[in-house]
């Protein structure tokens, strides 16, 4: 229909007001939810509003935040990456194996481990993207395959055992709390989010990620190669899985082939709660950070309230579904504003 | 008058805009009522009220003497009002028969679909609309015109009292339109009331009894069509006269060949085609829907694979394997599917425009927002795109303004030859004229322009030369001096007529 929404175009809301409304509806909504949930638990759950608990939450969201940052890129292009959990496991055993090599000095070993983690993750991510674009297979399937392959590879590399004995300096850095309020691993997560935010918001590459997710055929016919950006998004997701593996090593000090089980679903949940649309093209990485916070605050808060481990997942599951329902409403509202 | 449908002071308000205001209208039982109006005049809103998609904010509607307040499209169907939307709502992977009777599949015991009854009823329905196709055919295998007829047959399967056709001819070729009209006349003879919405003014006289013109959400007037002329209708629609729709500019000088295509073969089964367009020339491409016009243009542009063929731009052979090669060499393609392939619907105007060449508004990979906004504002002004601001999502623009945004994105890139596939489809008269003017401006700037269209008067009004496709072949080339509607049509049919 040629004039479906013409009435809105005929007399639009003034640009400045539209901008404000858009901000409130799209970006501030999740933040407000986080504030309300935090407030709720602060008033009801014992020990929730303590600095110790806040620190604990910061530490606990680090891994998921890093994974979800990369996942945001993939979901923005309209894909999904189910493999990040087991890619993380593979990276932890690769990283740990490199790090405990006694022929290397700790500094060199740690640097090499970081590079190895990132390279391993990036290669897995690249394969995900390349296979799904080259043969036009839904990324759901390809990354499901990678989930299994990476999990198997992790067992092979580690000989099915947990790797311990990381350098003391590395372990110390993982326990470091900068200035008494900023855990080092949370800092890593924030840096990853900041980098992602910068790329998505200010660069040509970021613009193309959004455009590909909005309509890849239009992007192709405009003279670009959408597959390049899709592969890049998966590579970034693999890369962040590698970084998340380093965060895992910093926090738990072991490389484990059975690490990361189910992590991909938490990452996806954070992205979705953060307001990124599963169909691509819409969303923000700041939202993802907030989404990760909401998940952890809920989890911790419910625990402190004494909600049992059996009931906790039910509540969290409900919240995820609720977030998507709200998202649908938000879309409708946004369309009226724009 | 025995009114089947009457609207009393109907109004509909959207946030920030009045879509319909105080519309009172009666549709007589058994008449074919034309509704005209530019984009944004309120036609679609009116249809959506009837379809149960929107509910009126004021006024009342009565159908068959009863208050009519559908809450959902299903309510509307139950009441006997059936809408054939411009964008067809068929399920491509089901058979024609299944589509026809989807809401009421004939069943045997245990809910098993009765295939025999299904197909025999489908055959009867298809016969009513003059379609001679196996009802077991999957809908995806049909052409647009055939799908349209299936939609109408579907509407008939529910014993509809009132049939609303929303721009049914937008994608049809003249012979297909003729067939549609004879079906409409037959339905009318059977006593079906029809509301017919169209952009094409010439055609409404053939089938319409009365006409209602909407402008800016208000009803301008309802008149008998008899005695009215096209200029009358135009005046009612836009409130002023339009002298010559096309504005052919004979003063433009033609230069060297801008694009030459030699022996382009899409695949082993299709014949090789050759054509060229000069700088400053508008080349028309005529042919029935499905005659290979669009496919040839897409293959040339690298949008679809091609087997063989030489493409020369400015006299130099170029290799085009993907759209990015074509774009790099100065080709632009405005696709027939504007929303699906041309635009980033949920992204704002400026980002749609700059997507073709972000390098122009960035430095070291960083987008310079200010330069981007300046460039977009510049083009929006130049093309007179009516948008609240460049930050408005293109989804919310009218068809004509969306098309201008597509043109703007190619102008932003800078182009030597433009291929336009149905550039005025779903675009109202006012915007259509602006697009024509723009094309003349581009021709004057020595661009080569290829215009594919199903609207033959449009091609004859705009083009220096027309090439005609028939069954994937170029069967003729007609210079402007020899333009003749019948001749071009007979060429278009040439390969389909069995000797």
Image: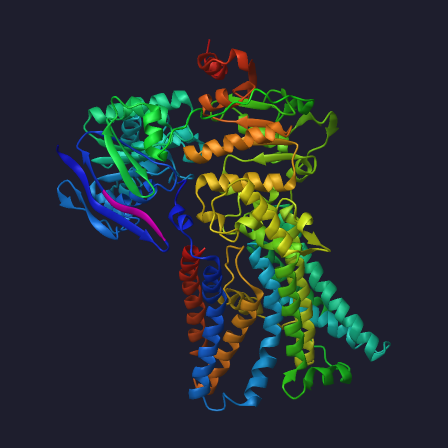
Q: Position of residue B241 (x, y in %)?
A: 38, 29
Q: Quadrant of the N terminus of chain A?
A: top left
Q: Is residue B83 depicted above or below B455 in this figure?
A: below
Give the residue at the far top of this rendering. Answer: B499
Residue B181 appears in the figure: yes
State the residue at coordinates (69%, 80%): A253
Q: Quadrant of residue B202?
A: top left
Left or right: where B13 falls relative to B392: left
Q: Which residues are magenta?
A: B17-23
State the residue at coordinates (65%, 88%): A180
Q: Nearer the viewer, residue A198 or A271?
A: A198
Q: Position of residue A49 (x, y in %)?
A: 50, 88
State the count of labels: 0
Left or right: where B93 falls relative to B68: right
Give the residue at the far front of this rendering. Answer: B240
Q: Nearer the viewer, residue B275 or B100?
A: B275
Q: Quadrant of the C terminus of chain A?
A: bottom left
Q: Nearer the viewer, residue B420 or A251?
A: B420
Residue B136 appears in the figure: no
Q: Position of residue B116 (x, y in %)?
A: 29, 33
Q: Nearer the viewer, residue B488 or A192?
A: B488
Q: Is residue B18 magenta?
A: yes
Left or right: where B62 falls relative to A16: left
Prevalent SS, magenta region = strand
Q: Is residue A7 depicted above or below A38 in this figure?
A: above
Q: Position of residue B449 (x, y in %)?
A: 59, 28
The scheme the figure's colours follow is rainbow
Q: Quadrant of residue B78?
A: top left
Q: Is residue B329 magenta?
A: no
């Amino acid at each position: 229909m040629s004039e479906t929404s013409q009435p809105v175009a005929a007399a639009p809301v003034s640009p400045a007001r539209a901008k404000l409304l858009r901000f409130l509806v799209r970006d501030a909504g999740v933040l407000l939810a986080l504030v309300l949930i935090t407030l709720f638990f602060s008033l009801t759950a014992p020990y929730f509003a303590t600095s110790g608990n806040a620190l604990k939450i910061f530490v606990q969201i680090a891994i998921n935040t890093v994974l979800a940052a990369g996942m945001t890129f993939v979901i923005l292009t309209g894909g999904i990456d189910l493999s990040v959990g087991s890619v993380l496991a593979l990276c932890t055993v690769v990283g740990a194996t490199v790090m405990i090599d006694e022929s290397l000095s700790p500094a060199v070993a740690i640097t090499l481990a970081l590079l190895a983690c990132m390279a391993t993750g990036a290669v897995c991510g690249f394969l995900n993207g390349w296979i799904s674009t080259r043969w036009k297979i839904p990324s759901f399937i390809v990354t499901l395959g990678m989930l299994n392959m990476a999990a198997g590879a992790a067992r092979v590399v580690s000989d099915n055992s947990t790797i311990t004995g990381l350098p003391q300096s590395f372990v110390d850095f993982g326990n470091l709390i900068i200035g008494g309020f900023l855990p080092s691993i949370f800092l890593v997560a924030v840096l990853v989010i900041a980098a992602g935010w910068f790329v998505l918001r200010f660069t040509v590459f970021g613009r193309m990620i959004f455009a590909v997710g909005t309509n890849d055929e239009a992007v192709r016919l405009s003279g670009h190669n959408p597959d390049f950006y899709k592969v890049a998004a998966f590579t970034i997701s693999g890369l962040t899985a590698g970084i998340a593996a380093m965060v895992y090593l910093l926090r738990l000090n072991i490389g484990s082939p059975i690490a990361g089980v189910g992590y991909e679903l938490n990452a996806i949940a954070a992205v979705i709660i953060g307001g990124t649309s599963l169909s691509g093209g819409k969303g923000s990485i700041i939202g993802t950070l907030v989404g990760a916070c909401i998940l952890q605050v809920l989890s911790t808060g419910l625990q402190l309230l004494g909600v049992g481990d059996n009931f906790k997942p039910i509540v969290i599951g409900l919240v995820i579904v609720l977030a998507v329902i709200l998202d649908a409403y938000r879309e409708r509202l946004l369309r009226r504003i724009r | 008058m025995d009114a089947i449908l009457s609207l009393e002071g109907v109004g509909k308000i959207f946030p920030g805009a009045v879509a319909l205001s105080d519309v009172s209208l009666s549709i007589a039982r058994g008449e074919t009522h034309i509704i005209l109006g530019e984009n944004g005049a309120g036609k679609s809103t009116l249809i959506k009220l009837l379809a149960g998609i929107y509910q009126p904010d004021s006024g009342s509607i009565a159908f068959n003497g009863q208050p009519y307040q559908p809450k959902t499209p299903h309510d509307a169907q139950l009441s006997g009002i059936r809408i054939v939307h411009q964008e067809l709502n068929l399920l491509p992977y089901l058979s024609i028969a299944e589509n026809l009777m989807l809401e009421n599949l004939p069943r045997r015991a245990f809910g098993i679909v009765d295939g025999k009854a299904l197909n025999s009823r489908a055959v009867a329905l298809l016969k009513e609309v003059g379609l001679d196709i196996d009802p077991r055919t999957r809908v995806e295998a049909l052409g647009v015109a055939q799908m349209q007829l299936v939609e109408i047959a579907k509407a008939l399967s529910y014993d509809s009292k009132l049939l609303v056709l929303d721009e049914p001819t937008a994608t049809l070729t003249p012979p297909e339109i003729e067939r549609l009209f004879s079906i409409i006349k037959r339905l009318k003879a059977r006593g079906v009331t029809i509301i017919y919405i169209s952009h094409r003014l010439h055609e409404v006289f053939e089938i319409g009894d009365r006409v209602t013109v909407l402008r800016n959400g208000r009803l301008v007037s309802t008149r008998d069509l008899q005695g009215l002329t096209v200029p009358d209708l135009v005046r009612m629609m836009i409130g002023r006269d339009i002298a010559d729709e096309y504005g052919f500019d004979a003063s433009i000088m033609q230069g060297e060949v801008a694009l030459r295509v030699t022996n382009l073969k899409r695949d082993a089964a299709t014949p090789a085609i050759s054509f060229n367009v000069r700088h400053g020339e508008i080349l028309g491409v005529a042919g029935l829907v499905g005659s290979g016009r669009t496919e040839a243009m897409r293959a040339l542009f690298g949008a679809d694979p091609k087997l063989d063929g030489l493409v020369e731009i400015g006299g130099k052979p170029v290799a085009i394997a993907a759209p990015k090669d074509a774009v790099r060499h100065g080709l632009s393609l405005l696709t027939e599917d504007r929303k699906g392939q041309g635009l980033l619907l949920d992204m704002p105007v400026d980002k749609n425009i700059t997507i073709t060449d972000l390098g122009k508004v960035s430095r070291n990979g960083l987008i310079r927002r200010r330069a981007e906004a300046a460039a977009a504002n510049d083009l929006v002004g130049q093309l007179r795109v009516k948008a609240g601001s460049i930050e408005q999502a293109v989804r919310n623009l009218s068809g004509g303004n969306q098309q201008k945004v597509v043109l703007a994105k190619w102008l932003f890139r800078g182009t030597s030859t433009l291929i336009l596939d149905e550039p005025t489809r779903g675009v109202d008269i006012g915007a259509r004229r602006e697009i024509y003017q723009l094309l003349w401006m581009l021709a004057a700037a020595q661009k080569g322009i290829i215009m594919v269209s199903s609207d033959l008067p449009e091609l004859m009004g705009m083009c220096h030369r027309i090439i005609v496709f028939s069954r994937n072949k170029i069967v003729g080339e007609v210079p402007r001096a020899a333009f003749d509607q019948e001749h071009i049509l007979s060429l278009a049919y040439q390969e389909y007529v069995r000797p």
